[in-house]
Amino acid sequence: MAVTTDPFTATDLAAVISETWTSIVNEKTFNDTVLANFITDLSSFASEGSDIFHVPNLYTNALTVSTQSTQGAEINTAGPAQVDTTLTVNTHKYVAFIIGDKDLVQVASKYNVAELYANEARKLLTEALEQDIAALWSSITTNAIGDTATVLSDAEIRSGLYALENLKYRLADAAFFFHPYVYWQQLHAVTKYYQQYSYGPANAPGAVATGNFGMAGYEQNYKGQLYGVPVFTTSNIVSGLQTYRNLLLHKRAFGFAVQTKGGNKVRVQAENAIRNLGMLTVVDIVYGVGVLREEAAVLLNASSAFIGS
Amino acid sequence: MNTNNIPEKPLYASMDGGKVERAQPIFFFQREDGSVFHVDERAAWTLYQGRSKIVGRPAERLKIIGVGDGTIFQSYVIKAQESFRATQNIQESQKLIREGVEKELEACRGKARVPANYDSLDSGGRPVNISSLR
């Protein structure tokens, strides 16, 4: 009789084959905060209280130039009315979770579950702020380019830059914010942006080689520059109804103020909740967002039904 | 700026690989100047609450003039894709998508409703009524 006819199988050894819980944890991914890092931040004014923050508007009604047609005649003075503009802090968002004491003591010691979820909650709330800033697109009417069927191309990019500069906003203080779909699927198909004959000398490789429009800058989703204007990508750019609402913003176009209690942008509080016999963690943020100068923003609509080829 | 002046041009684009999103509610808003624009439900909630405010201007009065379920628009996007596969004509496909928006508005004009409350969201980003949760 052969001695190798009945080898041990994994099933036979099930009682002694162990499982290992690794220390690697797959966490949820989040965008970097590109919008909040760029637009006007009024948070420093919020530290001493108030729910409404005033930004006087001197540009709606401006001074006028007069001509002294008759020498010696009395001059006319101008007194344009100022406009009182305000941003209101009126949003309080939170993420809360509770882990029962029994479960807490039974979780493997290598996992700091409360900290991992608090970290996720913090990033969720920071993204909520970014999403609310991106949602301000619906207020942009002066400079709205494209529609539900537009494939973003060089013409739209140049139209946006023209619109901003024509209204006397410095492009040095502006930036593009694209959805990754539009950046990779439409803009990177524009031959002008990567063909050597249009891009430049051989020692300055184009977007196909480097993945961006300029010097390396993948930190914080910075993708380089387009016509000298910084380009950022974020999937917080609003998308819906087959349309991505990309933005070309001057720094002063949008504003926000964070007024979370305790002084940090996001507050994390944890306590032993005796009545629930568990550890309660609440992460919250208090903020307000608003459009400060509507004409300093350009909306670049792009369809999700097309890719550049 | 008037974007109608951007000339139509031959496009190097394709609908192969483009997305056809699932049908979702489309909210049509009318501005005070009479112009109409459409948004999805989440943006509609922000506009409905008056939170999308331009600082320094009185809050714009927006009117919901219709809410469609998005199926007509989706069917036109699919038609646009089929047209592109048959003719490789991007302009024709774009025309169909724009027509889809108009047809959706035609079908739902006068049927308005309040957008879902997006103030409370579950972990998937869907609105949830907290008071109904245990």
Image (tube, rainbow, N blue to C red):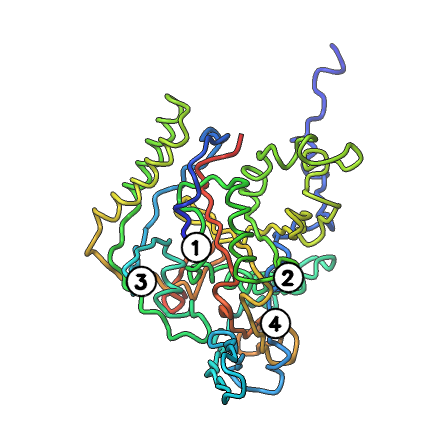
B15 to B127, vertically: above or below: above
Q: Secondary structure at mark 2?
A: helix
Q: CA distance from mark 4 to mark 1?
A: 28 Å
Residue furthest to the front? A71
Q: Secondary structure at mark 4?
A: strand
Q: Which amino acid is tagged 4?
A: Asp
Query: Which label's residue is closer to the chain start, 3 or 1?
Result: 1
Crowding near the residue tagged with mark 3, few <14, some 14–19, many ≥20 C-alpha atoms within 10 Å: few
Chain bearing tag 1 is B
Q: CA distance from mark 4 to mark 2?
A: 14 Å
Residue A295, how many percent across, how many down?
48, 63
The numbered mark at residue B15 is none
Q: CA distance from mark 2 to mark 3?
A: 30 Å
A155 to A7, vertically: above or below: below
Q: CA distance from mark 1 to mark 2?
A: 20 Å
The numbered mark at residue A173 is 2
Which quadrant is the N terminus of chain A positioned in?
top right
Query: Which residue is labeled 4 in the image?
Result: A41
Crowding near the residue tagged with mark 4, few <14, some 14–19, many ≥20 C-alpha atoms within 10 Å: some
Residue nearer the viewer, A259 or A82: A82
Residue nearer the viewer, A287 or A246: A246
- Residue A89 in view of the camera: no
Chain bearing tag 4 is A
The numbered mark at residue B1 is 1
Query: Which residue is labeled 3 in the image?
Result: B31
Q: CA distance from mark 3 to mark 4?
A: 29 Å
Q: For this view, does B79 lie left or right of residue A215?
A: left
The residue mark sitting in front, 3 or 1, is 1
Q: For this view, does A222 lie left or right of residue B97?
A: right
The residue mark sitting in front, 4 or 2, is 2
Q: Which amino acid is tagged 2?
A: Asp
